């Protein structure tokens, strides 16, 4: 038996799929398990997970996730997490609460920084300073500043979850889980139901921590190119004071229903007379741990609903019974998996028809079989994704951790969850042998499975008022039962909490946080290889990067060939290119070919001003990827969709408009700060105005109008789409961005050049766009329990000349003043400042905020804060380190290639980037004060946009001054 630094080796295995050696260890003394993944990835990841089964819906696991990061034995500052956020080179820093587990992951490419992050996180989870005041701030408390004043409920998680329960989609997802698991811990909301959060006492809070935050219940994870022995040595020292303990974390299996069940729940629809229902069918599936079966169910999920051509999704959309799909499909992350699918935007009398349609469609597929081309496409799509291992902005090691923990937390082998080759090959062999494998899965897990719940979410126009009244009644009852002494105690708690929040950390406490020095920072920028290849009438940008044989191709067209009245059609046009079929292919056949022959094609847009040219850039891109030997297939598909997409297919276009509308409506609550940000920016320049036309509130209203126009004046809609194609798809306004290694590029270059030379060409002209004027004070109203508040303006118009120090100051504001004033003291889930150096736009934003006037007041005082700020040398260094961390954000090859493309289009040179970096590294306190002078002009002249319930605007000090726009 191998033993090293107090750890006993349980298993060692090489995972060829990821060129990674995996070792699973157990700490002999404490019982902690440790998964060590060793490879050459410089983006190192550490994580520690605890099984945290919720005892009720008070949100105690979620509140603890926030709270342990609020100071610890070794790091006695108010927010070590924020200090790390401000002053490290982290590539990931967060914590996440799941239905039965809590994770604390960090990542960095800098080894010293990596272990600094680990040290703070370990002390946070094992030695947190969780006092009653931590619960008051992060969970909930009675807020009462004066015995005669109005008492309210306040707390960060309390307001976060009020925001979550304002979203019909979130309510449906949570209630689906509860309905499928009515007899286990999954009947509770681990994040917390707002009403139940108010029942959480400090005793229960502390007890939960003492029970579950122990090494015997810990799953520790390392990934990357750091020394694997040092990992064990370090963790052995950290675990020395602990001995094994039995911890009750066994999650019982949900007993299976003998017959299907039905359930109804409600959402706040406000005064919308057209509010509709949602319905999902939900099944309990297999227990976690069977890797092959779970992979097969992922593939089945893609085959059923993964693309618009998937048969179950297509049947639901084609039925016209609803507006868009709902339900999360196949869901892991529980001891037993589940499946959820349905429709949103359903007339209440049609919900049973939707249920019948789902069951009839599944029956038809099980009896008559899938189209084999659909299954081939789904198998290829899932396999491409597994092999590419493209995790976007997330570190690869983090996604591997999440996959491992999903198996590990239930007592299964975490390494099994990472090795996909054997189970994938077994599934492919069964399919290639002609076995009706996927049809049998449908029969077994859906048609012959009585553990099914039909869940209908119905609109209730009174629910919001009832919730607000119930909250007030609860406050009145609580206050009525309090003695004068108890009221005075609440006043004192409120004042003491405020005093703690407003008292800055001492220099000695801040000095405990481990930090890099400026000497640890690379003085030179990171560059991306780029070559510009000018063809006769178009242009190629090429980036010589190792991509493991995958071609990344971005094909762009300059949108200024379009008049401004066509811009709102762009999201529908770009979807129609890929989802209506072509001259020779139905849309089902087209999507099958994309799935079989490529790694995917999707549209995206770029709208940005250029600081260098002072001109707007506006581009539509089709971003595709394929194995190099399938490059010709990718190009052939692109040519076909660009030149012969069926833009005349009225019913498909109508379905896409409905789906886009429903998606935008349901996404507002989840990303209200983005809605506000997009709307604010639209006031200040042409590029951001165009972005709002295609992705903001204006787009939502356009889609609603377009639905009617499709029914009453289809010919004009069709003609506009055809005109967009004729004006836009031209080689003289095209750019092709290629990311690939040089050897493979030489093989495919002739195909790419031939493709570009055969694009259409005709008369082109550049259209200027006249932006419309929006009000300086705008209220966007819809049924909400929380608010999203924004204030902003253009700093360049206020006389500011860009300096790299802004990239230090703005993140510092997010992690200091705005964090303290908007989140900690205000109770919002988030407070931000965002600055676009290309346009000069600077916006303050809040997220899931209980306040409006108070938040605006905090925004307005930012300038004064900066002008009076006294920064120690260590605090200034910390801010500079954090800025470099953001500037040097880790990227995978496709993201590097796209970043280089954007820089080219905006005229950003490496010389300019190096100058900015030097300005960042030499930022001074004087720069902060000068930036404060600039923001003072914003306090006086900034525009305001807020998204909130109507009554919030009515009770604001600015009531009567808002230009109101009802969103929902």
Image (cartoon, rainbow, N blue to C red):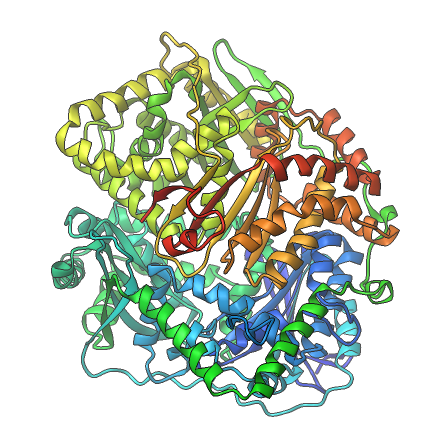
- Name the residue at the front extreme: 148
Where 265 sits versus 543, above or below? below
Q: Quadrant of residue 257?
A: bottom left
Residue 652 x/y as whole percent:
21, 37
Residue 815 x/y as whole percent:
68, 54
Where 65 sits versus 869, above or below? below
Question: Who's the residue at 60% across and 72% down the image?
Answer: 146
Count of marks placed on residues? 0
Relative placement, left or right, of 964 versus 135 is left
Relative placement, left or right, of 141 versus 478 is right
Query: 430 and 627: which one is in front?
Result: 627
Residue 823 x/y as whole percent:
60, 60
Report whether residue 436 is seen: no
Relative placement, left or right, of 675 versus 145 is left
Query: 620 and 216: which one is in front?
Result: 620
Report whether residue 562 is seen: yes
Q: Quadrant of residue 621?
A: top left
Where 919 sits versus 15, above or below? above
Which quadrant, please, contains the N terminus?
bottom right
- Name the residue at the bottom extreme: 246
Query: 721 and 370: which one is in front?
Result: 721
Q: Quadrant of residue 258?
A: bottom left
Residue 100 x/y as whole percent:
48, 76
Query: 960 and 931: which one is in front?
Result: 960
């Amino acid at each position: 038996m191998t033993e090293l630094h107090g750890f006993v080796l349980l298993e060692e295995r090489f995972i060829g799929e990821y060129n990674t050696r995996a070792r699973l260890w157990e700490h002999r003394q404490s019982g902690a398990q440790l998964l060590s993944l060793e490879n050459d990835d410089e983006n190192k990841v550490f994580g520690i997970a605890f099984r945290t089964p919720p005892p009720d819906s008070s949100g105690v696991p979620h509140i603890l996730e926030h709270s342990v990061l609020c100071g610890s034995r070794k790091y006695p500052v108010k927010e070590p997490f924020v200090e790390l956020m401000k002053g490290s080179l982290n590539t990931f820093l967060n914590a996440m609460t799941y239905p039965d587990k809590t994770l604390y992951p960090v990542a960095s490419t800098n080894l010293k920084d990596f272990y600094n992050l680990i040290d703070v996180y370990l002390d946070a989870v094992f030695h947190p300073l969780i006092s009653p005041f931590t619960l008051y701030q992060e969970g909930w408390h009675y807020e009462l500043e004066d015995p005669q004043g109005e008492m309210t409920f306040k707390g960060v998680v309390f307001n976060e979850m009020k925001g979550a329960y304002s979203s019909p989609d979130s309510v449906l997802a949570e209630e689906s889980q509860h309905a499928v698991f009515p007899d286990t811990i999954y009947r509770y909301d681990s994040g917390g139901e707002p009403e139940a959060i108010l029942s959480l006492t400090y005793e229960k809070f502390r007890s939960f921590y003492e029970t579950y935050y122990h090494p015997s219940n810990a799953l520790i994870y390392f990934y990357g190119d750091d020394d694997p022995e040092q990992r064990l040595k370090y963790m052995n020292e950290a675990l020395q004071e602990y001995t094994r303990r039995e911890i009750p974390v066994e999650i019982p299996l949900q007993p299976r229903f003998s017959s299907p069940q039905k359930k109804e729940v409600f959402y706040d629809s406000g005064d919308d007379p057209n509010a509709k229902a949602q319905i999902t069918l939900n099944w309990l599936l297999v227990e976690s741990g069977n890797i092959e079966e779970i992979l097969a169910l992922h593939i089945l999920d893609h085959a059923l609903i993964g693309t618009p051509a998937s048969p179950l999704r297509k049947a639901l959309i084609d039925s016209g019974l609803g507006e868009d799909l709902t339900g999360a499909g196949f869901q892991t992350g529980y001891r037993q998996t589940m499946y959820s699918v349905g429709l949103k935007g359903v007339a209440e009398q049609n919900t049973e028809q939707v249920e019948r349609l789902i069951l009839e469609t599944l029956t038809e597929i099980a009896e008559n079989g899938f189209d084999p081309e659909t299954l081939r496409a789904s198998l290829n799509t899932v396999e491409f994704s597994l092999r590419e291992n493209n995790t976007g902005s997330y570190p690869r090691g983090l996604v591997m951790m999440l996959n491992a923990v999903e198996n590990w937390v239930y007592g299964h082998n975490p390494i099994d969850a990472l090795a996909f080759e054997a189970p994938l090959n077994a599934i492919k062999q069964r399919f290639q042998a002609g076995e009706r494998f996927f049809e049998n899965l449908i029969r077994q897990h859906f048609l012959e499975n009585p553990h099914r719940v039909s869940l209908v979410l119905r609109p209730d126009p009174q629910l919001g008022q009832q919730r607000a009244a119930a909250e007030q009644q609860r406050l009145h009852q609580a206050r009525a039962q309090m003695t004068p002494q108890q009221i005075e105690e609440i006043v004192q708690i409120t004042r003491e909490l405020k005093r703690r929040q407003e008292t800055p950390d001492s220099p000695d406490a801040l000095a405990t946080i481990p930090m890099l020095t400026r000497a640890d920072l690379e003085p030179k920028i990171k560059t991306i290889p780029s070559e510009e290849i000018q063809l006769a009438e178009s242009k190629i940008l090429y980036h010589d990067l190792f991509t493991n044989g995958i071609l990344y191709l971005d094909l762009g067209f300059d949108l200024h060939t379009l008049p401004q009245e066509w811009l709102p059609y762009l999201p529908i046009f770009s979807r129609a290119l890929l989802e209506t079929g072509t001259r020779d292919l139905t849309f089902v056949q087209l999507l099958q070919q994309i799935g079989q022959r490529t790694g995917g094609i999707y549209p995206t847009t770029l709208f940005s001003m250029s600081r260098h040219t002072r001109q707007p850039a506006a581009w539509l891109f089709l971003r595709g990827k394929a194995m190099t030997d399938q490059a010709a297939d990718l190009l052939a598909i692109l040519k076909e969709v660009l030149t012969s997409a069926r833009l005349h297919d009225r019913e498909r276009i109508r379905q896409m408009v409905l789906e886009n509308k429903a998606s935008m409506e349901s996404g507002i609550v989840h990303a209200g700060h983005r809605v506000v940000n997009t709307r604010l920016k639209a006031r200040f320049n042409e590029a951001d105005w165009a972005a709002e036309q295609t992705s903001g509130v204006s787009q939502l209203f356009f889609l609603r109008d377009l639905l009617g126009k499709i029914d009453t004046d289809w010919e004009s809609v069709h003609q506009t789409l055809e005109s967009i194609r004729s004006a836009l798809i031209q080689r003289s306004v095209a750019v092709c961005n290629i990311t690939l290694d040089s050897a493979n590029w030489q093989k495919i270059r002739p195909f790419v050049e031939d493709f570009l030379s055969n694009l259409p060409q005709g008369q082109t002209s550049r259209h200027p766009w006249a932006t419309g004027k929006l009000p300086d004070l705008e209220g966007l109203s819809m049924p909400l329990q929380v608010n999203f508040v924004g204030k902003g303006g253009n700093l360049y118009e206020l006389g500011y000349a860009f300096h790299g120090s802004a990239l230090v100051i703005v993140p510092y504001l997010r992690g200091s003043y705005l964090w303290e004033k908007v989140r900690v003291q205000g109770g919002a889930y988030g407070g931000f400042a965002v600055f676009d150096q290309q346009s000069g736009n600077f916006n303050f934003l809040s997220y899931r905020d209980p306040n409006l006037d108070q938040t605006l007041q905090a925004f307005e005082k930012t300038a004064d804060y900066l002008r009076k700020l006294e920064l120690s040398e260590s605090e200034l260094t910390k801010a500079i380190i954090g800025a470099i961390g953001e500037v040097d954000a880790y990227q995978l090859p496709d993201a590097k290639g796209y970043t280089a493309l954007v820089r080219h289009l905006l005229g950003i040179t490496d010389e300019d980037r190096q100058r900015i970096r030097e300005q960042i590294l030499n930022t001074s306190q004087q720069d902060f004060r000068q930036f404060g002078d600039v923001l003072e002009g914003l306090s006086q002249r900034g525009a305001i946009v807020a998204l909130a319930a109507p009554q919030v605007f009515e009770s604001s000090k600015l009531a009567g001054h808002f230009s109101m726009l009802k969103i929902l």
